[in-house]
Image (cartoon, helix red, strand yellow):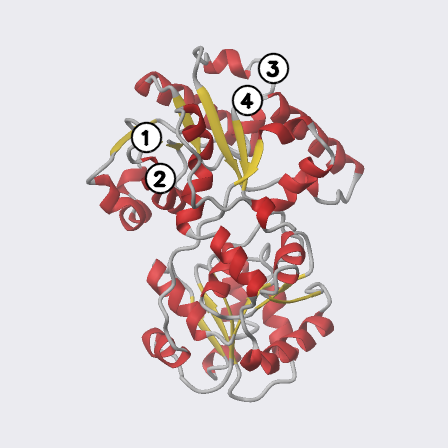
Amino acid sequence: MFEPDAGGHRLTYLRQLLPALDGLGAVTVVVGEGAIGTEAFRVQLGELRETHRFESVTFDKRGGMLGKARARLDALRAAMDLCDPEHVFIPSGDGLAQLLGMPGSMKRLALKAGVQIEVGMHRGSFAYPSRTLKERVIRGATLRSLTRAPLQRVQFVDVLAYEWLRDRGHPLAARASVLADPVDPVEDVSKSEARRVLGMPEDGRVIGTSGHLDERKGVDRLLRAFRSADLGDSDRLLLAGRPSPGIRELIAGEFADMVSSGRIVAMTRYLTDEELSATLAACDVVCTCHPAHVGLSNICLRAAAAGRPVLSGDYGWFDRVVGGFGLGWTCRVTDERAFSAAIARALDSAGSFEVGDRAQALLAFHSQANARRTFTASLRDRLGLERDDGLIDWESLDA
């Protein structure tokens, strides 16, 4: 497995998927130089380091998307020289996968005969509306590069990308599949208990969001919509995770009075997985308010697993999955008045919300066990092993 970047979800993905390879051959995990010494590595992979082989290679993360992709390509070449693999898994291949289809990249990689590469793709922007002609041209070019890349399997986490290829009979569809986004098991914790764990008041209703808090996720819009919403004095907004500089400034400035009064509970730091679970359990409604996000949201899935309804934007994956599978409600988060009204309605409706059959089927697909099955399906086929009896594929949900 190859993952040079220790940022974001990437080390979490290694922790969740690495055990799927146990018993399928000798496995080496290659990470970027310095990653093993980070707190994120210790939290996510400390235990697995005791039982699995980890190596590191130089990863010179340069500026810009193309520079970062080239840095990953150089690190991949170093990793392959180090390990001499037969099968390569790249769980987070965005950028690098497209680069592999560009002229000169394969010569730079020097791929040996018989080596097969599988990548996980978290973004499929070609499946989303383009706002400008330039954006449309760029997305078309990157899709052509991805299609040319010598990849045995392209596993899309975003089902919109997979369905776009499948429904159009695109040449890449024959090598594409859906990689379930693994949802860690969720403890059955009451709202009151979770709020005690987090040190916040136990009364009132809470709408909250967790993870990295930034403008891309619409947290600035959530702050303003919550302030404008017709709510009771004991209704609270929970913000849990590391904020961007802009969000930190809003919390400390424009919304400082709401923080000091307790209307906004701000836990602005890195959260452990246990704390993240507690923030979801503490909420009556979990809000994922990305205004124009390409890709999915694992927080939506984790909220559903915790039995909490989701209020999300009505764009892309959120419209397809939150709306289509009954995880909660969607609204136009770019319209402050509509967003504020949706917050009030969601909190009023949360008490009667139930996770229905469609949502349960979606959660079964995204279970950690099934994510591992989807991850290794192609390798098992290469090894001549039978299909895992427990495998749930996306087509069974997409009826």
**Residue 10 occupies quadrant:** top left
Residue occupying image coordinates x 54% and y 89%: 233
**What crowding class fits label 2: few (fewer than 14 Cα within 10 Å), some (14-19), or many (20 or more)?**
some
Residue type marked 1: Leu
Residue type marked 3: Pro
Disc with the residue nearer the chain's start (3 vs 1): 1
- Cα separation, mark 3 vs mark 2, equals 34 Å
Q: Are marks 4 and 2 in contact (CB under 8 Å)?
A: no
Residue occupying image coordinates x 69% and y 55%: 315
Instruction: Using the image, tell me which numbered label, if any, was put on residue 24.
Output: 1
Q: Relative to 320, does residue 167 appear above or below in the rendering?
A: above
Q: Relative to 240, does residue 340 appear above or below in the rendering?
A: below
- Cα separation, mark 3 vs mark 1, equals 33 Å
Which residue has dot 2 on it?
20
Which residue has dot 4 on it?
100
- Residue 187 vs residue 398, the one in the foreground: 398
Mark 2 element type: helix
- Cα separation, mark 3 vs mark 4, equals 8 Å
Q: Relative to 232, does residue 317 appear above or below in the rendering?
A: above
- Residue 275 vs residue 161, the one in the foreground: 161
**Residue 388 occupies quadrant:** top left
Q: Please state which of the two labelled residues, at mark 4 or mark 1, is closer to the viewer.
A: 1
Instruction: Using the image, tell me which numbered label, if any, was put on residue 103.
Output: 3
Mark 3 element type: loop
Q: Please state which of the two labelled residues, at mark 3 or mark 2, is closer to the viewer.
A: 2
- Residue 173 vs residue 108, the one in the foreground: 173
Disc with the residue nearer the chain's start (4 vs 1): 1
Instruction: Using the image, tell me which numbered label, if any, was put on residue 86.
Output: none
Horizontal and vertical percent for residue 283?
A: 47, 74
